Image (cartoon, rainbow, N blue to C red):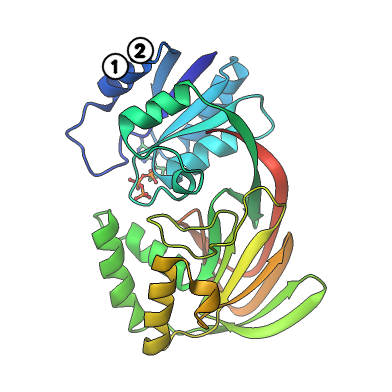
Amino acid sequence: MRICFILNPTSGTNRTQDVPALLTRYATAAGADFEIRPTQYAGHGEELARQAAAEGCRVVVAVGGDGTVNEVARGLLRSTAALGIVPRGSGNGLARHLRLPLDLPGAVRRACQPTFQRIDAGRINGRWFFCTAGLGFDAHVSKKFAQAGTRGLSTYVKVALREYRSYRPVPVQVELNGQVVETSCYVLAFANAAQYGNNAYIAPRANIQDGLLDVCLIDALPLLRAVRVGVGLALGTLPTSGGAVYHTSHHIRVRTRHPLGFHVDGDYAGDATEFEVQLTPLALEVAV
Ligand SMILES: Nc1ncnc2c1ncn2[C@@H]1O[C@H](COP(=O)(O)OP(=O)(O)OP(=O)(O)O)[C@@H](O)[C@H]1O
């Protein structure tokens, strides 16, 4: 079984680690037949993953954060290779959802001696996501975070608190399961996995193999409710907190009058006034 590690050298906060040397050490100890291919630019992971799968690698491992996982996973759709993850981001939502080891030696060992299962994959306006996508405040924060210059959880929290003061919900029309709902959107999240990352559980009941997205709507976020939502995210109790409303569906359309930002697995993906969100059941094989 050949394994290819696709390493994003820019991910992670610990830049002093010699990651290729460590990958080599742990993969050799696990008796793996492997290679390491570093990405050279954003988007390169998808190309490298597609190539590795075409060359017969059985497991293609994303070594990075959720952005790298998204790229590599996209390259593996409709292939015979499974996605492995050696998490090195700040959130690591998919790795956490799949209960993969978060430490480098443990994650490499697991990628080299995996079991296999399939998971669902979502698309928003044609962009694939595997963990979560969404509109509103979380997308707005991803945009500002990308412009912040530094990364990591503390920058994310600082940006979120700063933006909270000025962000206002927008009217949206949401169509799902044959119903049309006119509402406000502070956050509208489409969850394939249960969490955003960092154990922030936006949809704790989400099942990644059930052919459905958990749709979480927060229509407004005044201060007291923000506290309830924050506690609910951390404890996995958001559905019973009174701060959010949930639906499940495999096809959702959203319309707004004014352009609204959206994110794909935590990365800001642009603004739009119409959104089509779809789920493809069991589209991706994962090594867990
Ligand atoms: N060689 C590269 N040079 C510049 N950017 C890259 C390179 N390889 C990948 N990228 C981009 O870097 C972005 C961020 O990577 P990733 O999410 O893996 O790490 P992170 O930002 O440290 O993690 P997190 O998002 O969890 O904080 C990805 O969206 C990816 O497109």
| Disc 2 residue type (three-letter) | Thr
The secondary element bearing badge 1 is classed as helix
Q: Can residue 148 be seen in this view?
A: no
Q: Is residue 119 visible?
A: yes
Q: Which residue lies furthest to the right in this view?
A: 178
Where 154 falls versus 185 (above or below)?
above
| Disc 1 residue type (three-letter) | Arg
Counting from the top left corner in percent of width and height, residue 56 is at 60, 15
Counting from the top left corner in percent of width and height, residue 182 is at 69, 85
Counting from the top left corner in percent of width and height, residue 24 is at 32, 17
Where 127 falls versus 228 (above or below)?
above
Q: Identify the residue position indicated by label 1 in the image.
A: 25
Query: Which circle marks residue 28 in the picture?
Result: 2
CA gap between label 1 and label 2 equals 5 Å
| Label 1 with label 2: CB-CB less than 8 Å | yes
Where 12 falls versus 265 (above or below)?
above
